[in-house]
Image (tube, rainbow, N blue to C red):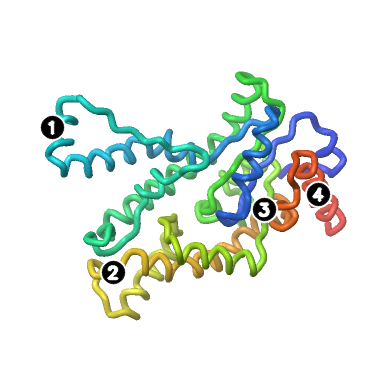
Amino acid sequence: MMIPAAKDWLASPNKKVLLFGMSGLGKTHVSNMLRATGAWFHYSIDYRIGTRYMGEHIVDNFKFHAMKDPFLAELLRSDSIYIGSNITFNNLAPLSTYLGKPGNPDLGGLPCKEYRRRQDLHRTAEINALQDTPHFINRAKALYGYPNFVCDTGGSICEVVDPWDENDPVLKSLAENTLMVWIQGSEAHTDALISRFDKSPKPMYYQPEFLERVWSEYLSDNKLQEGEVNPDDFVRSAYARALEARQPRYAAMAENWGVSVCAEDVAQSTTPDAFVALIGKALEKRAKAA
């Protein structure tokens, strides 16, 4: 793995950084701020997943629901209307809507078999999107002339890699091409994220073993069959446990493959220069601890 010295990072005219951590701690906000300068290319993993790798699945799901309406069905059959996904860096709802939640279909839930299939699709798509990073680094420089590059990853990156395996192919590729930076939240951040999620529970990707465990326990504890599950209640029950399970994986990614910065410090870094300087301090801290 190639972690630069702080002075080399600060002096480099071609900075390449990958941000990872819990969703809601500022990865996309920082990426948007950097992109707005015109000197940074913003590569969003979730956007790549939702357009390149799962775009057809997403649109087919829209069409499946539209076909239930006789008026829309006739227009679709005659190619009189077009249905597409308007996914953006800041609105990933088409992707999360397709991923869905398991449970009672009358409450918007998916049968467990279909839900697992979509989870598997997302896992493959996320790995592919992450492995596309070197291509986009080269593309950003050669095609558009961007000197700097920021990769904005999804919160589930730690679920599709093995941060303790020095030969993990995804992490090896990312570490060879970018400086990997964990935006580390505090307990207060975690509490705030859980509170926000409780108010508006959203679909998310889970590691298969974790999903099977929490799903089985939820059914057993509540004495329910899968078709009786309230989808929002289930994902609420799983969210805090998922955040807790991800923390050691994020920490290992930072320890073995990159550096970490505090979310509070990131929030105060309101300019590209301030953010670059913050990363420089993280590199100095890592060097002193080595």
Q: Secondary structure at mark 3?
A: strand
133 horizontally vs 279: left or right: left
Give the label, 1 or 4, closer to the camera.
Answer: 1
Task: Determine contact: label 1, label 4, CB under 8 Å.
Answer: no
- Considering only order in the chain, which callout, 1 or 3, is on the residue closer to the N terminus? 1
Percent position of residue 182, x then y: 67, 53
For label 2, the crowd category at 10 Å Cα-Cα, with few meaning under 14, some 14 to 19 and many 20 or more, is many
Residue, disc 3: 182
For label 3, the crowd category at 10 Å Cα-Cα, with few meaning under 14, some 14 to 19 and many 20 or more, is many
Between the C-alphas of marks 2 and 3, the distance is 35 Å
**Does residue 249 lie above or below 282 as drawn?**
below
- Considering only order in the chain, which callout, 4 or 1, is on the residue closer to the N terminus? 1
Between the C-alphas of marks 3 and 1, the distance is 50 Å
Residue, disc 1: 74
Q: Nearer the viewer, residue 70 or 45?
A: 70
Task: Determine contact: label 3, label 1, CB under 8 Å.
Answer: no
Percent position of residue 251, x then y: 66, 60
**Snapshot quadrant of residue 146:** top right
Q: Amino acid at mark 4?
A: Leu
Residue at 60%, 32% (x, y): give it.
134
Q: Secondary structure at mark 2?
A: loop
Residue, disc 4: 283
Q: Amino acid at mark 2?
A: Val
Counting every numbered tag in the picture gives 4
Residue at 75%, 39% (x, y): give it.
272
Q: Secondary structure at mark 4?
A: helix
Residue, disc 2: 229
**Does residue 11 lie above or below 277 as drawn?**
above
- Considering only order in the chain, which callout, 2 or 4, is on the residue closer to the N terminus? 2
Q: Nearer the viewer, residue 177 or 105?
A: 105
Q: Amino acid at mark 3?
A: Trp
